[in-house]
Amino acid sequence: MKFFDISVPIRGGMPVYPGDPPVVVEQVASIANGDGLNLSLATFGLHTGTHVDAPLHFIDGAPGADALPLEALIGPALVVDATVFAGDIGEAEFQALAVPPSARRVLLKTGNSSLWDRDGFSSEFVGLTAEAANLLVGLGVRLVGIDYLSIATASDPAPAHMALLRAGVVIVEGLDLRNIEAGEYMLACLPLRIAGADGAPARAVLWRA
């Protein structure tokens, strides 16, 4: 059985969404400097790298990341090749992807994954419009992921987020799908269990049984 790690490594200076805290990783104890152990400190926002959005991210008083259902985060997943689209995925583009009604976890492989090679944030990413998000909700999808720092369009991020989170769809952002072929997989995406958090970093892994 082969496993595919589709998480983005967290590192100092990595791209973050505008307005998010920068990533800083520093060593506070070092064996080389005479300490008895190596110990590091990391500071970053909860929407850094590969992460999940909780409903609380856009809906005040809604559940946090620690309340996300495990059954939505683990199970069969469909990787859909959307690299043909250079712009945002709207209603027509989404329908062209022909996502089957049986899909419950959908990962969108776009041209975004190549943006991880850039030193800073790029606003040229592909996202979902609210209309496309509502089509996912209509299919009964429980989880949707994409390969950059926002599931939504750069020009208007709120409507797509709201459509998905109000319907209880788990959003996974910041995936790296460059080396993943379209098709059916098993997915495990486990966010840190941070009480009352609006999001949480996650390790996401695919495999084929």
Image (cartoon, rainbow, N blue to C red):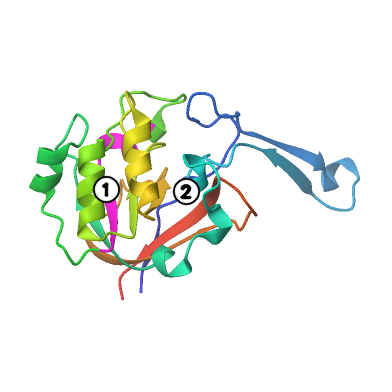
Farthest front residue in view: 61
Residue at figure coordinates x 20%, y 29% from the top left: 87
Q: Residues within 10 Å of mark 2 (few under 14, many from 20)?
A: many
Please provide percent x and percent y for residue 44.
63, 37
Q: Residues within 10 Å of mark 1 (few under 14, many from 20)?
A: many
Q: Earlier in the sequence, mark 2 or mark 1?
A: 2
Residue 186, compared with residue 202, is above or below; it is: below
Magenta-colored stretch includes residue 147: no
User: In the image, what residue type sits under mark 2?
Assistant: Pro
Residue 129, compared with residue 193, is above or below; it is: above
Closest to the observer, 116 or 132: 132
Secondary element type, mark 2:
helix
Instruction: Between label 2 and label 1, give the one nearer the viewer.
Output: 2
Measure how far apart labels 2 and 1 are at the Cα level.
20 Å
Magenta-colored stretch includes residue 112: yes
Magenta residues (range): 104-115
Task: Report the residue marked by disc 1.
Answer: 108
Is residue 105 visible to the viewer in this orientation of the structure? yes
Task: Report the residue marked by disc 2.
Answer: 55
Please provide percent x and percent y for residue 208.
30, 70
Answer left or right for 87 relative to 52. Answer: left
